[in-house]
Image (tube, rainbow, N blue to C red):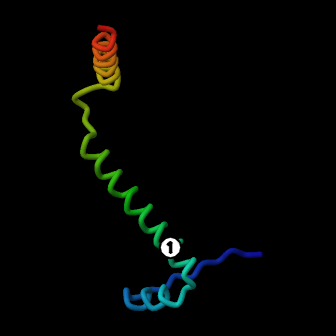
């Protein structure tokens, strides 16, 4: 069987009309998928804003270990 695809252009109002015709369980599922996509986009933007070549992963790891050691030492006193 041959795979084929069709591409159509729909307006926001047309999409909204289609969504309104869905059963409640599919509306909820669609809502979760849209929320998931939005979270992933925000996370990607956030991670990109912190990306830098000024500090290496090794330097970050060393600093994390130093802070952990300091916190551990404080707990022991």
Q: Is residue 73 above or below residue 22?
A: above
Q: Of all residues shown, which one is farthest toward the right? A: 1
Q: Residue at x 22, y 29 (%)?
A: 54
Q: Residue at x 36, y 58 (%)?
A: 41
Q: Of all residues shown, which one is farthest toward the front? A: 77
Q: Nearer the viewer, residue 44 or 32?
A: 32
Q: Of all residues shown, which one is farthest toward the top? A: 77
Quadrant of residue 5 in the image? bottom right
Q: Nearer the viewer, residue 10 or 70?
A: 70
- Looking at the rendered image, the quarter that the N terminus falls into is bottom right
Residue 24 drawn at (x, y percent)? 54, 81
Residue 76 drawn at (x, y percent)? 33, 9
Q: Nearer the viewer, residue 28 or 53?
A: 28
Residue 62 drawn at (x, y percent)? 32, 17
Q: Nearer the viewer, residue 8 or 31?
A: 31
Residue 13 vs residue 6: left or right? Answer: left
Residue at the disc numbered 1: 30
- Looking at the rendered image, the quarter that the C terminus falls into is top left
Q: Is residue 3 above or below residue 37?
A: below
Quadrant of residue 68 in the image? top left
Residue 71 drawn at (x, y percent)? 30, 17
Q: Residue at x 34, y 26 (%)?
A: 57
Total marks shown come to 1
Crowding at mark 1 (Cα within 10 Å: few <14, some 14-19, many 20+): some
Q: Residue at x 57, y 82 (%)?
A: 6
Q: At numbered mark 1, what does the secondary structure look like: helix, strand or loop?
A: helix
């Amino acid at each position: 069987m041959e795979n084929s695809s069709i591409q159509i252009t729909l307006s926001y109002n047309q999409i909204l009309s289609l969504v309104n015709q869905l059963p409640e369980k599919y509306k909820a599922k669609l809502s979760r998928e849209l929320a998931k996509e939005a979270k992933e986009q925000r996370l990607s933007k956030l991670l990109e804003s912190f990306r830098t070549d000024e500090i290496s992963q090794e330097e970050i790891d060393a600093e994390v270990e130093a802070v952990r050691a300091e916190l551990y030492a404080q707990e022991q006193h």
